[in-house]
């Protein structure tokens, strides 16, 4: 037995000792109910307001709702996985066996992550609803669910590292929630605070104009789970709309020149929450100067100028996965024996 | 010689920040014998056990620390396979039955599955927990949990067994059973190291005793030799205590009336001296009804060692 067997052994043990409490059935039942009630009510509300294509906003809001809920659940899954065992006096007896630190780390992480994935699985019927209806392409649904699953794993890994670093379970739980809060709210606050700090000022003669440079601080938004999920999910395309513009004639000021047809790329009519968030962060990455150019018209080509910044989510998700990997490494390091240094107040057995 | 002993530790040091928990511990635990680790609270017994259990790294200054022939600083993973450890306090996974608990550790020690089932049945028999095999662990009493912990430590047939205060919290019957169990393991060739405060009991369990004080080994003794050579107080009861007092005075043996119980405390005397004195007293016509060491030899040795601390 080696490697994967050890990981599975530890994971199975975690499940057994946790699941036999029976409370999980009630919790998962409540979870299913909350997501279901939300989906049904949302759908009714969209029907009542005669929204076009209700599947798209339903899909978007439901995913954001599920994201918020999983971000509330995920830290609790592993935030006491190491120090909780230490407090109960079951960690040291595990460490003296032939299980390696990595087997213990990955086994406990796998159990926590799998539990998080189970909550996602329960939300799946409601996520599938707009896909089955044909309002949302299956690829969109798949990408969203995969990204959600990865986000849950990242949070589980971070919470586990905190439980390995901090002696008391209550402290590591609190810190895990703070970390999630920082990613969800803190990044947005940081972005909006940073923006005026990086703005440049242009003297226009009569007044000083402040030019926004969000392209310098967009990366502050990248680790945000909402941003990652929304931007990674393929969005509805921007639609091209053309308008006829009639300008006053330049020669005598009375007549009008023949109307000129100009086309622009605009947000689709359907309210698409994920798409909107994704477009906003990509616009933020573009910066004010280029952003305004978006409406520019290429006369020669007879088409709107296509300007779009690259995606933001690979940075966010990449950062998250790096942090998660680092977290697992920290946990394994802290479980290494013989221990050279001990955390403050850590009692081995 | 090195390969022949279960534990060989020389000059083990370990500090936590500025606090030096171990200042040079020497310890030998031969196979087939029970070695007792005796010392006050804070003397470093548990720290030494943690080092030997491969949980805590000794400081770089340590001269030698080997378990089952493996140097713990370089081959701790190999040592683990032949090492069983029971801490003074430990938790069990409450939701599991006794068998599931042992099965988990058998797998964690990589005991082949087919072998594990028979081994677990055998161990439950050995620690008298057969009727609790399918019971959840949390219904077990403290003594039963302690025995389950011992079964856990033995699940992979270790050659070296380290037990930290195994008798604490056990009722007299469980202690007797523990004693028999440890003697049995030693008889099978296991090297057993036991730390305890209950000194009288160690006299019955141990073949060797290692005294530790303030992070240092104060002495390693063969218990039989120690019992023979150490001086202790002997409590003598005679039909006529005045006559006994006169006889003791005549032979200038220090003595005083025992406090709380009838009899006279004489000594310190070694076993040899005590035996001679008894012969003399009988020869003097003192009619003796009881003649026994007070508190055991280990206790006297231990108290003498720790006396200068007060």
Image: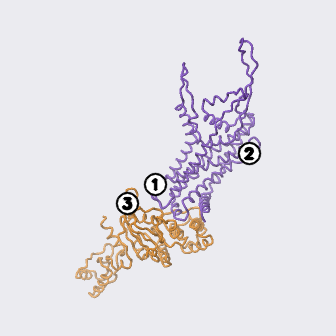
Chain colours: A purple, B orange
Against A288, residue B205 (above or below) is: below
> Is disc 3 placed on a helix, strand or loop?
strand
Q: How far apart are marks 2 and 3 (CA)?
A: 64 Å
Residue pictured at 39% horizontal, 73% vertical: B209
Residue pictured at 39% horizontal, 59% vertical: B15
Work out whether residue A64 can be spotted. no
Indicate left or right for B266 with A303 as reference.
left
Q: Is B38 or A341 nearer to us in this picture?
A: A341
Mark 2 nearby-residue class (10 Å; few <14, some 14–19, many ≥20): some
The chain identifier of the residue carrying mark 2 reads A
Residue linked to disc 2: A138
Indicate left or right for A49 with B109 as reference.
right
Mark 3 nearby-residue class (10 Å; few <14, some 14–19, many ≥20): some
Q: In which quarter of the image is the N terminus of chain B?
A: bottom left
Work out whether residue A94 can be spotted. yes
Mark 1 nearby-residue class (10 Å; few <14, some 14–19, many ≥20): few
Against A251, residue B85 (above or below) is: below
Q: Is A341 or B134 nearer to us in this picture?
A: A341
Residue B8 on image: x %, y %: 43, 71
Q: Quadrant of the C terminus of chain B?
A: bottom left
Q: Which of marks 2 and 1 is nearer the N terminus?
A: 2
Q: Tag on residue B20?
A: 3
Residue A258 on image: x %, y %: 76, 19
Residue pictured at 53% horizontal, 54% vertical: A331
Residue pictured at 68% horizontal, 45% vertical: A144
The chain identifier of the residue carrying mark 1 reads A
Q: Are marks 3 and 1 on the same chain?
A: no
Against A240, residue B16 (above or below) is: below
Q: Are marks 2 and 1 on the same chain?
A: yes
Residue found at the very far front of the displayed protein? A300
Residue linked to disc 1: A343
């Amino acid at each position: 037995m080696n490697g994967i067997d050890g990981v599975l052994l530890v994971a199975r043990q975690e499940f057994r000792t946790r699941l036999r409490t029976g409370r999980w059935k009630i919790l998962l039942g409540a979870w299913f109910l909350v997501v279901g009630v939300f989906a049904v009510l949302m759908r009714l509300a969209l029907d009542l307001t005669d929204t076009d294509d209700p599947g798209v906003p339903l899909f978007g809001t439901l995913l954001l709702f599920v994201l918020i809920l999983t971000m509330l659940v995920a830290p609790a899954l592993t935030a006491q996985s190491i120090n909780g065992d230490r407090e109960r006096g079951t960690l040291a007896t595990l460490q003296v066996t032939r299980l390696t630190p990595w087997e213990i780390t990955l086994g406990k992480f796998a159990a926590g992550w799998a539990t998080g994935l189970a909550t996602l699985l329960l939300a799946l019927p409601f996520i599938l609803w707009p896909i089955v209806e044909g309002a949302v392409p299956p690829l969109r649904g798949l990408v969203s669910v995969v990204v959600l699953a990865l986000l849950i794993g990242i949070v589980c890994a971070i919470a586990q590292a905190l439980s390995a670093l901090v002696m008391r379970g209550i402290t590591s739980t609190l810190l895990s929630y703070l970390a999630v809060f920082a990613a969800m709210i803190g990044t947005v606050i940081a972005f909006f605070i940073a923006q005026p700090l990086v703005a440049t000022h242009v003297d226009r003669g009569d007044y000083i104009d402040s030019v926004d440079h969000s392209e310098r601080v967009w990366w502050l938004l990248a680790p945000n789970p909402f941003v990652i999920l929304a931007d990674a999910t393929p969005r509805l395309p921007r639609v091209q709309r053309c308008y006829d513009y009639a300008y006053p004639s330049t020669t005598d000021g009375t007549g009008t020149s023949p109307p000129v047809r100009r086309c622009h790329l605009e947000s689709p009519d359907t309210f698409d929450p994920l798409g909107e968030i994704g477009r906003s962060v990509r616009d933020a990455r573009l910066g004010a100067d280029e952003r305004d150019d978006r409406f520019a018209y290429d006369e020669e080509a007879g088409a709107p100028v296509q300007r779009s910044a690259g995606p933001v989510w690979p940075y966010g998700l990449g950062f998250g996965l790096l942090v998660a990997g680092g977290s697992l490494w920290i946990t394994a390091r802290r479980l290494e024996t013989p221990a050279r240094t001990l955390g403050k107040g850590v009692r081995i057995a | 010689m090195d390969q022949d002993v279960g534990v060989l530790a020389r000059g083990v040091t370990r500090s936590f920040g500025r606090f030096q928990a171990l200042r040079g511990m020497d310890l030998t635990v031969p196979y087939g014998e029970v070695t007792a680790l005796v010392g006050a609270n804070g003397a470093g017994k548990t720290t030494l056990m943690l080092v030997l259990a491969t949980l805590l790294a000794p400081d770089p200054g340590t001269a030698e620390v080997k378990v089952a022939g493996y140097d713990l600083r370089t081959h701790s993973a190999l040592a683990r396979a032949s090492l069983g450890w029971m801490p003074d306090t430990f938790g069990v996974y409450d939701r599991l039955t006794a068998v599931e608990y042992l099965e988990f550790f058998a797998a964690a020690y990589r005991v082949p599955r087919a072998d594990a089932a028979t081994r677990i049945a055998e161990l439950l028999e050995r620690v008298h927990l057969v009727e609790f095999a399918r019971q959840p662990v949390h219904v077990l009493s403290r003594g039963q949990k302690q025995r389950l912990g011992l079964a856990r430590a033995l699940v992979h047939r270790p050659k070296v067994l380290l037990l930290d205060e195994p008798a604490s919290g056990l009722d007299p019957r469980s202690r007797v059973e523990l004693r028999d169990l440890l003697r049995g393991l030693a008889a099978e060739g296991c090297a057993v190291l036991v730390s305890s405060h209950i000194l009288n009991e160690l006299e019955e369990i141990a073949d060797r005793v290692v005294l530790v004080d303030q992070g240092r080994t104060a002495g390693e003794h063969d218990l039989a030799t120690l019992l023979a050579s150490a001086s202790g107080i002997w409590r003598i009861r005679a039909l006529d205590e005045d006559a006994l007092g006169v006889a003791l005075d005549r032979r200038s043996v220090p003595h005083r009336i025992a406090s709380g119980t009838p009899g006279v405390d004489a000594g310190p005397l070694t076993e040899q001296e005590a035996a001679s004195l008894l012969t003399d007293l009988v020869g003097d016509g003192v009619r003796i009804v009881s003649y026994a060491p007070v508190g055991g030899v280990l206790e006297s040795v231990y108290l003498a060692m720790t006396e200068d601390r007060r």
